[in-house]
């Protein structure tokens, strides 16, 4: 059971949670009110189908937003023949949104993009909100101090019908990130290092709040990268209490309040954040002062090392299950223990996904490109997270720099993060990817994924092998 | 949703930790718009070799385990994505319960909402279970939800935890969506109080 904090001992999470409990019976889960429900084509059709036979309507279409991202092509529409199944799925979403009056950014809309990219960029994601989506990386929105988490399709149906969810209150965990990052080391490296340390089930049952100097000094995009991958540590949600960085990002976005409403919202948002004497069910601290760029070598996001380190040797692992998992992962990846990953060949570099496809990620990558070309042996896919980011990048000329370097500049979407739209690895290929999952076959059957930051990805693209970006800076 | 009270069945051992949802049902099989047929693609990339033929080494391809309704798996089962396609695929294959030491949160929720019972046991029991099926592959286990008990072939009864609400839902006492719908008045008052617009 989670503790019942007194008023002045509440954590940020406690405040947001309590503010949304509609009702709770003893022994029953809380009925939690949802402020924003995000919807995409893959996990929603069965939920809409559930409503019809029961004669139910969508309770609050005005608190719902749908987009198309997972199975959309990343080549211009006039250049692709769409997979008929994917096309049907997209059509289905369109019809469902029409029937139930839900706003939809469909193919062709200038607001379309990856669900976790567009909601913040439109200013729909706001501090203190509850946000859900049939997608585990909903944790991204926690960067704004929202309580945001992924749900299954049955729960999508519950939210459509009632704007509420049945939830047991998770425990709370503070993850304090101290220290100052060295140049070339980024938010992505922080979260990969954290997961390597606490493990992919280290956060199960917890809502995580990230605190500390290193978190405070991140911009919103870096904070989103960190919160995005909270789920890779198994956490229910990852949150960062809002501060001036948050408010500056939100000011004047399309859906944020304006004028006096903005002032009122600000004073409400400033009440959020954990109390000085708040206590968490669990607290851990990690210092990132000497952190190097991180990279994964295995088949889950917790199997990561600093880029100069050697691949762990199963012979040195005592726990029999961890040892078995390591052996299995190295066999799948076809890697030798004890050797460094640096210099390992790379076939594909993917720069994209809801973890790292935002404008700062693209700027970071082009800064390292600096007139260089990518290796002829490497296929490099750059997939902006949204139409808006694509437009911004093109206005800055970033796309030309990618194209001139020999990279493919694509249309926005999830793309090779999940490989549902045809952008896939071939069996046996090695990819350095800025996405969030390196599970077996995640990016295409038999494909092998090294997760890393945009800097490490582009450095590896340039040299055709796994490369420490700091050597090119 | 499917109800659950008591099953007796042989068990299928999958002694691997951190089995993620991309293994349970790879994303390329999620382009459908209903819940049907996913069982055919359960563990697809482990079940089939590169040339598309069944992998004779993989447990689900063995004749003797066909019809087994209980899956026994390593720690942290179902980590990864929120896809409810994972429990749909497991149930499509014929599984009614998964036994492990721990489950990923979203998978756990999704399973309960579909009548697929996640049974949490401690490490020692899990090791015993794997040993038992290794020795006698066709041995039967019984899971009794009302009693919250897992009956082992050696006569032991192991208690497992489940929250009251989910238990009642699975036993057919509460329909979760109906329960939420019955709270309409409270939801309206909440909305009036918090969002007068
Ligand atoms: S980019 Fe990848 S992780 Fe993010 S929503 Fe799309 S498929 Fe999921």
Image (cartoon, coloured by chain):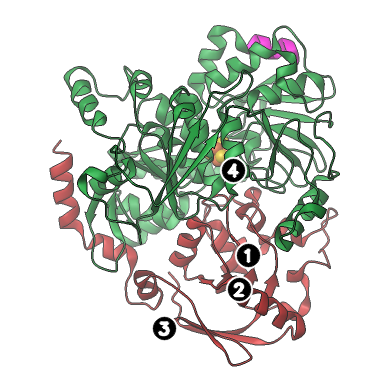
Tags 1 and 4 in contact by the CB under 8 Å rule? no
Residue A195 is labelled as: 4
Which colour is chain A painted?
Answer: green
Q: Is mark 2 within 8 Å of ligand 1?
A: no
Look at mark 1 in the image and give the residue it sits on: B39
Q: Is residue A425 above or below residue B152?
A: above
Q: Which residue occupies the foreground of this view, B82 or A12? A: A12
Tags 3 and 1 in contact by the CB under 8 Å rule? no
Q: CA distance from mark 3 to mark 1?
A: 27 Å
Magenta-colored span? A399-407
Which numbered disc, 3 or 1, marks the residue that appears first in the sequence?
1
Look at mark 3 in the image and give the residue it sits on: B146
- Residue for point 73% across, 70% down: B60
Query: x, y percentage for residue A433?
Result: 68, 32
Is residue A60 visible from the viewing direction of this image?
no
Which numbered disc, 1 or 2, marks the residue that appears first in the sequence?
1
Query: x, y percentage for residue A10?
Result: 27, 45
Q: Which chain contains the residue that carries disc 4?
A: A
Q: CA distance from mark 1 to mark 2?
A: 8 Å
Q: Which chain contains the residue that carries disc 3?
A: B
Q: Which residue occupies the foreground of this view, A453 or A71? A: A453
Q: Which chain contains the residue that carries disc 1?
A: B
- Residue for point 80% across, 25% down: A378
Residue A401 on the magenta span: yes
Q: Is mark 1 within 8 Å of ligand 1?
A: no
Is the stretch drawn in magenta largely helix, strand or loop? helix
Dividing the picture into quadrants, the one containing residue A247 is top left
């Amino acid at each position: 059971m989670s503790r019942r904090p007194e008023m002045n001992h509440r954590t940020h999470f406690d405040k947001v949670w309590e503010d949304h409990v509609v009702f709770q019976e003893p022994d029953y889960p809380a009925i939690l009110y949802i402020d924003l429900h995000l919807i995409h084509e893959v996990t929603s059709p069965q939920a809409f189908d559930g409503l019809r036979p029961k004669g139910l309507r969508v309770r609050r279409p005005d608190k719902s937003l749908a987009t198309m991202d997972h199975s959309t092509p990343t080549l211009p529409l006039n250049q692709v023949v769409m997979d008929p199944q994917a096309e049907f799925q997209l059509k289905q979403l369109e019809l469902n949104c029409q029937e139930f009056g839900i706003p939809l950014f469909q193919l062709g809309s200038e607001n379309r993009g990856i669900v976790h990219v567009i909601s913040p960029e439109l200013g729909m994601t706001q501090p203190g909100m509850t946000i859900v989506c049939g997608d585990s990386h909903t944790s991204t929105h926690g960067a704004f101090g929202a309580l945001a988490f992924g749900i299954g399709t049955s729960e999508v149906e519950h939210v459509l019908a009632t704007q509420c969810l049945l939830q047991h209150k998770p425990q709370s965990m503070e993850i304090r990130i101290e220290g100052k990052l060295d140049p070339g080391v980024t938010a992505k490296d922080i979260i990969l290092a954290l997961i390597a340390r606490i493990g992919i089930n280290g956060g199960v049952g917890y809502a995580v709040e990230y605190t500390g100097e290193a978190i405070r000094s991140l911009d919103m995009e870096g904070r989103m990268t960190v919160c995005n991958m909270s789920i890779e540590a198994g956490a229910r949600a990852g949150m960062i209490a809002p501060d001036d960085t948050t408010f500056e990002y939100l000011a004047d976005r399309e859906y944020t309040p304006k004028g006096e409403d903005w002032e009122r919202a600000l004073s409400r948002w400033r009440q959020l954040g954990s109390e000085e004497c708040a206590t968490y069910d669990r607290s851990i601290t990690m210092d990132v002062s000497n952190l190097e760029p991180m990279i994964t070598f295995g088949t889950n996001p917790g199997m990561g090392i600093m880029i100069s380190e050697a691949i762990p040797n199963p012979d040195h692992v005592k726990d029999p299950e961890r040892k078995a998992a390591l052996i299995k992962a190295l066999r799948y990846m076809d890697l030798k223990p004890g050797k460094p990953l640096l210099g390992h060949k790379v076939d594909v570099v993917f720069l994209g996904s809801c973890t790292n496809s935002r404008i700062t990620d693209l700027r970071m990558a082009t800064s390292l490109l600096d007139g260089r070309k990518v290796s002829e042996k490497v296929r490099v896919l750059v997939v902006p997270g949204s139409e808006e980011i694509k437009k911004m990048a093109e206005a800055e000329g970033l796309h030309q720099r990618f194209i001139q370097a020999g990279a493919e500049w694509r249309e926005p979407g999830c793309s090779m993060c999940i490989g549902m739209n045809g952008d896939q690895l071939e069996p046996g290929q090695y990819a350095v990817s800025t996405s969030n999952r390196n599970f077996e076959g995640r990016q295409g059957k038999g494909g092998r994924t090294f997760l890393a930051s945009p800097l490490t990805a582009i450095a590896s693209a340039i040299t055709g092998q796994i490369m420490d970006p700091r050597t090119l800076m | 949703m499917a109800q659950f009270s008591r099953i007796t069945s042989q068990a299928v051992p999958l002694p691997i930790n951190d089995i993620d949802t991309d293994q349970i049902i790879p994303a390329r099989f999620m382009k459908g718009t209903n819940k049907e047929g996913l069982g055919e693609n359960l563990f697809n990339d482990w079940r089939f070799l590169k040339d598309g033929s069944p992998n004779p080494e993989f447990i689900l391809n063995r004749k003797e385990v066909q019809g087994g309704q209980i899956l026994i798996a390593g720690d942290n089962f179902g980590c990864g994505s929120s896809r409810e396609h994972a429990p749909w695929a497991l149930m499509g294959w014929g599984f009614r319960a998964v036994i492990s030491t721990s489950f990923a949160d979203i998978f756990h929720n999704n399973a309960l909402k579909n009548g697929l019972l996640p049974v949490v046991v401690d490490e020692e029991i899990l090791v015993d279970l794997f040993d038992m099926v290794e020795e006698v592959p066709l041995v039967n286990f019984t899971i009794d939800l009302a009693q919250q008990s897992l009956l082992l072939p050696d006569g032991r009864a192991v208690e497992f935890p489940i929250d009251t609400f989910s238990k009642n839902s699975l036993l057919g006492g509460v329909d979760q969506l109906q329960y939420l719908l019955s709270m309409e008045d409270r939801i309206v008052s909440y909305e009036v109080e918090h969002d007068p617009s």
